Image (tube, rainbow, N blue to C red):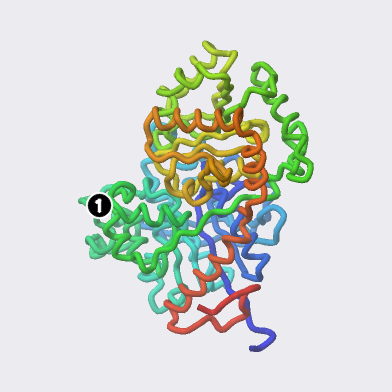
Amino acid sequence: MAKDSKPLKVLFVSSEVSPFAKTGGLGDVVGALPKALRRRGIDARVVMPLYAGMKWHELDGLDGALSVPMWWGTARAGVRLGSLPGSEVPVYFLEYNKYFDRPYLYGPPEGGYADNLERFTFLSRGALELARAIRFIPDVVHAHDWQAALVPVYVNTLEWAKPLHGAATVYTIHNLAYQGVTDGGAMFIAGLGREHYNPGEFEHFGALNLTKAALQHATMLSTVSPTYAREIQGPEFGCGLDGVLRGRSADLVGILNGVDVEDWNPATDPHVAANFSTAHPAGKQLCKRTLQLEAGLPADPSIPVFGVVGRLTHQKGFDVLAHCMDRVLSWNAQFVLLGNGDREAEHFFGTLSARRPDKFKAWLGFDNGLAHRITAGSDFLVMPSRFEPCGLSQMYAMRYGTLPIVRATGGLADTVQRYEEEAGAGTGFVFDDLTADALGNAIGWALSTYHDRPHHIRAMRERAMETDFSWDVSADTYEDLYLEAYRRRRGHAFAGRLPVHGRAG
């Protein structure tokens, strides 16, 4: 192979990229995976919108304007250039204030913006126009969730017989509950003819469905855990697209998300009262005491602290947690909660916090530093999710020796090893049925283990902290996915410079 052969080129297209803009796990993934790929020798680059509130002055403005074809004419956009922190991964920000200079990424809490199809049509077309303008013709375009779902469609249609048509496309489902569904009459906004509004592409139960079109057009499909990849092929979690996904099961892989092991590292975390590790575990007790004091709870080291961090939504199962709170608060245990979302849930947990300040503290909102302190200072983390494509909180918790209590679904089932009482094996407490009784029993199981088998708790903590959840593990699998997608698209293996440990299909 020639020494000057070029590396594998991958273009990410996403509506969220941490730390620039994020509402959940999507932003975390696109903010971390390209860095892991870059370390392997892959030329990974990212395209995202320039939203209101970003530090625009810290980004370099590129000369000229980018012309993006839209249904109403040509949008002339600016492009700003930055990089993912701590890396050389370029991030290209598409600057078009008409669409993105707004208070919310997708719309206010009561509903999405009416022109979201138009906004993310611009992102998808703009990303491909940008690639052409900077003469970066990727080997693989990696599109994320419904906001970038038009990318694989455009590669197959509008880019026909053009250089970008040779790019393989990978479409990743981060949460199938969000699909980009709108009225079928809006097909013209996507810039495609009415002939594409058919059951094999966009039409789904009489509506236009962006995710369905991406599932049909992408070279390869992925989602964020192996268990979720299986679950979405069935009616319970398939959200109406299980038949499409079963039809493409040979092209669908589940790859666990990693975590940012620099940001979430108990040995160096600047947010916590004391740093600690498996070799020097004493700091965790100081973190616990500090958390109890911050929450206004009795600073008693013998009382286990159960932490809850997350969005207060139906998906996360907090209604089930609410129904078992009276039972678990009758035990010798303390609970701290950080989250916001559903107004009824906020009211319930806020009222409970005021009524039981000796046992329960709720912070309503989000505070990154507090999330780190709860993760570090709790003995257990409770995650009663109805479904969880991957989940990150349980992995953060395990790195801090905080044992997860989770329902066996999606990425929770893939990352938490069920506690085995006889042998003391496992890294957390796993339950199957999403009922108040089952959740209460799992919390009680953890509580009794804490008091009756403390040596098991110590062993589980050490085992959890030593589990490797770094992005380097997942990047290896993504590398294989890209090479396979390239092989299928081109009909031959990638002939350029392979990444570190790369395998050509």
Please state which amino acid type lies under the numbered disc 1: Gly
Q: Nearer the viewer, residue 1 or 118?
A: 1
Q: Is residue 105 left or right of residue 111?
A: right
Residue at image location 53% in from the left, 61% down from the top: 12
The answer to whether residue 347 is visible is no
Q: Disc 1 designates what residue? A: 184
Q: Secondary structure at mark 1?
A: helix
Residue 432 image position (x, y, % from top left) = 40, 40
Residue at image location 67% in from the left, 50% down from the top: 466
Q: Quadrant of the N terminus?
A: bottom right
Q: Nearer the viewer, residue 286 or 254?
A: 286
When asked about the image quadrant of residue 380, the answer is top right
Residue 420 image position (x, y, % from top left) = 52, 44
Residue 189 image position (x, y, % from top left) = 33, 55
Q: Nearer the viewer, residue 326 or 147?
A: 326
The answer to whether residue 355 is visible is yes
Residue at image location 45% in from the left, 68% down from the top: 169
In the image as oriented, which residue stretches furthest toward the left? 206
Residue 442 image position (x, y, % from top left) = 47, 33
106 in relation to 60, above or below:
above
